[in-house]
Image (cartoon, rainbow, N blue to C red):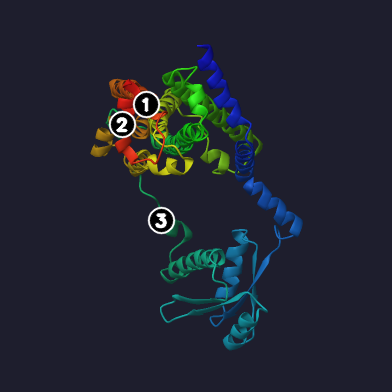
Amino acid sequence: MREFWIIFKQAFSTKAKTKSFIITTAIMIAAIFLFSNLSKIIDTVQSVTGGGDSEETLQVIDTSGVLADRLNGQFSANETGITVELSDQSEQALTKKVKEGDIDSFLTLALDDTKTIQANYTTMSAIDFNLPRVIQDALQSIQTELKAEGLSLSGEQVQTLFSPIQFEQKNVSLSAKSEEELNQARVLVYVLMFVIYIAVILYSSMIATEVATEKSSRVMEILISSVSPVKHMFAKVLGIGSLGLAQIVLYGIAGFIAMKTASTDIPGGFTDFFSFSDISTGTLVYAVIFFLLGYFLYATLAALLGSLVSRTEDVQQMIMPMTMLIVAAFIIAMTGLGDPELGYLQIASYIPFFAPLVMFLRVGMLDLPLWEPLLSIAIMLVTIFLLGWFGARVYRGGVLMYGPSRSLKDIKKAIQLGKE
């Protein structure tokens, strides 16, 4: 076991000390804090530049003589920060000012014979969406008031027209969750699926590249003379896997601190969106289990494939089939975020290469019977054992193979070489 732990420590420490690993980790942590505090940063910049509390003046041509005052009242009541300024200039003159950049936009208002508001908003900006929406909402309210006045309806009568119906949804399914639980589960499942997907691709590729690098530098010949190839393979898988887990835990701690420091009193904000207070402990446990199983499944396969190539340039080509499996699993799981009860998801959740993402999706969003995730876990454990047994046989001969790689056809040759 001494040789195993030496290789384990070497795989962990060597990668942890590389500049690329340190820089990537630092950038990711900085990005987490930046993203979580984005609203604070925007508010700070606006307050410094004086744009946070400044009012916007809207030039209005009102041929009706009554709409401009009502519009200004709506803006004041809704605290939009927009002030209406009646203009005595013609529409052509204001259009010229917009084109020359003297004003940002203007609005023309009129009433037709049916007391329906006719509004035209003129601007040069291609991304001016917020102000027109605010104006349209205010004018819609004014339109309702005008129609109510025409029908001699009181304010209370108008309110009754817009009274919402009493609608309650009742689900008698044993796997059903409340809407709030489902929304929080959907966010958590999406985040953790993305973490599993990226981690499996990143660290599996790292293992394959590490094995190929040692072969290309002829270090492998020295290593296998003092330690068995099987020990070497699993030491690499566990060493880089532990490094990956440490990095993800570091990201998790940074994310937790970032959310705490970014907490605001605004409901529906960032921290509310990513609040997992109602998520069950079982879901988090399943997240860890399926992450570890998914990693070891693909990492063992990556080590097997990496042992077949002699040049690091061939690694990506060799692990391409494995990458396509991960991508397919991610796409299948993503299609189930809206409806996790789809039939093909149930089938895919028992296929070992899809199960880490698909079964976690189902167990995170549905209250499944205990036997379903346990059966999927058992299938994955058996697959990992068989893949480890087969991978050890291939790895034993693959690390001794040199020359150009002929893709997956070299597996048979590696097994025969390992027997010798």
Q: Position of residue 200 (x, y in %)?
A: 44, 34
Distance between the alpha carbons at the discs numbered 3 and 2: 76 Å
SS at badge 2: helix
Pointer 1: what residue?
397
Amino acid at dot 1: Gly
Separation of marks 2 and 1 at Cα, in angstroms: 8 Å
Residue 283 in which image quadrant: top left
Mark 1, Cα crowd under 10 Å, few <14 / some 14-19 / many 20+, is: many
Question: Which of pointers 1 and 3 indicates the residue nearer the eye?
Answer: 1
Q: Horizontal and vertical percent for residue 352?
A: 31, 29
Is residue 381 visible in the rendered image? The answer is no
Q: Viewed as shown, does residue 311 lie left or right of 65?
A: left
Please report whichever mark, 1 or 3, sits nearer to the chain's N-terminal start: 3
Residue pointed to by mark 3: 162
Q: Report whether 414 appears left or right of 91.
A: left
Residue pointed to by mark 2: 413
Relative placement, left or right, of 141 versus 343 is right
Question: Mark 2 near mark 1, Cβ–Cβ under 8 Å?
Answer: yes
